[in-house]
Image: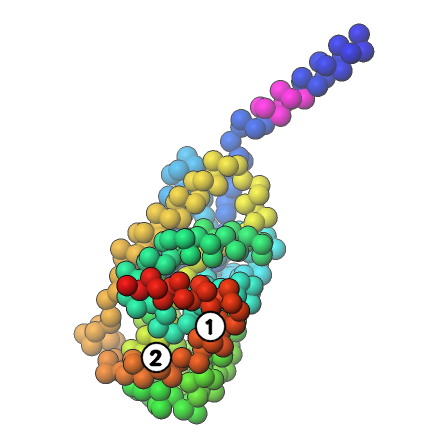
Amino acid sequence: MRLHTTLTAGLSAIAALLVLWACPTEARELTAADVYPPDHPNVQAVAHLSTLVAERTEGRHRIVFQSSQRGSSEGYLIGQVRNGTLDMARIDFASLASLVPTANVLALPYIFKSAAHRHRVLDGEIGAMILAQLEAQGLIGLCFYETSPRSFYGTKPIRRPADLQGLTVRAPQSGPWIRMMRTLGIKPLAMPYEHVYAALQQGTIDLAENNWQAFIGSRHHEVARYFSLTEHMRTPSVVIFSKRTWDTLGADDQASLRAAARDSANHLRDTVGDARPTPSMAPAGVEIVADVDHAAFATAALPLYQDLATTPQLQGILKRIQAMEE
């Protein structure tokens, strides 16, 4: 009788677990944040991702932006995602350099020689390996997002490295930007992205640097006379997800999220492309400086290829990326 009771209880427990396992994960609102304004293509891509997730989980999950997070630094957002306060965020991959040193390699100036070269790296074995490295830091890397090249803008036109000497330039608070700027003879001043407008307006900084969409979307064109197409960095963005939240999702939902993220990345790639801003696109009072000596900038940045790729492993990844150019 005792054995029969024990077996019955055990089978009942197993049956209960099977029922729970078969049930879909409880509906969730997954919180997201970004430092860019809502109309930035990368933020729009996350909105598209939210639509795909809702469709593919039959409405059980959706992604909502936390407006209170807007204006925060990317370093702050990374910390929020790692501790599970925030479920996900879109950030520049270079902002993860202190956690994942491989990010330094992708942030090297002029590391990608063409769109095809960039796509081969990010879509292939190297990209998958780099995303997988995030898990050890409490993050799940869902996908890379295409980002337009970063260029300098502000009160002075920039055509060659010598034009940057002694200028004060806003630098993001995390990532390899400060080291890059010092290599180019710049005086970097670290500050949150939300402070750039006032700093340009008040003359606290001479220049900032970012992509064209951020320049327009954040209204920096109102306080910057020149946008110089130095196109010195083409580091991808990455959609990061909290591992704490991830581990509470079922395998099917995880697969749906990954697939939706990849599809949103492909959609963004088709949207952004490699088109450069033209004079006709410039707001009133802004001059687009196109006659930039990219070869001189690439030469001036060469010391960073040793300074940022500091280990044999990183040098190996750098050589593999360079070999994929052909």
Disc 1, SS: helix
Q: How is the image coloured?
A: rainbow
Secondary structure type for disc 2: helix
Q: Position of residue 112 (x, y in %)?
A: 34, 67
Where does residue 200 sit, x and y in percent of width and height? 41, 83
Image check: 156 left or right of 31?
Answer: left
From the viewer's side, name the closer residue of 183 and 57.
183
Q: Nearer the viewer, mark 1 or mark 2?
A: 2
* Residue extent of the magenta highlight: 13-19
* Front-most of residues 70 and 232: 232
Kind of residue at badge 2: Ala
| Residue 32 visible from this viewpoint | no
Q: Which mark is residue 298?
A: 2
Left or right: 251 in relation to 145: right
Residue occupied by mark 1: 193
Quadrant in which the N terminus appears: top right
Please give the name of the residue rendered at 40% of the width and 91% of the height, measured from the top-left corner: 165
Is 314 rendered above or below residue 204? above
Q: Which residue lies at the image location 47% right of the left edge and 68% below the top edge?
A: 315
Dominant secondary structure, magenta:
helix
Specify the farthest residue to the left: 280
Instruction: Tell me if 23 is positioned left or right of 59 in this view.
Output: right
Nearer the observer, 185 or 125:
125
Magenta stretch contains residue 14: yes
Does residue 20 lie above or below 161 as drawn? above
Measured as percent of width and height from the top left, residue 66 is found at 49, 56
The residue at the point 57 percent across, 43 percent down is 247
User: What whole-number distance in Å separates the C-alpha atoms at marks 1 and 2?
Assistant: 26 Å
Residue 59 falls inside the magenta stretch? no
Q: Residues within 10 Å of mark 1 (few under 14, many from 20)?
A: some
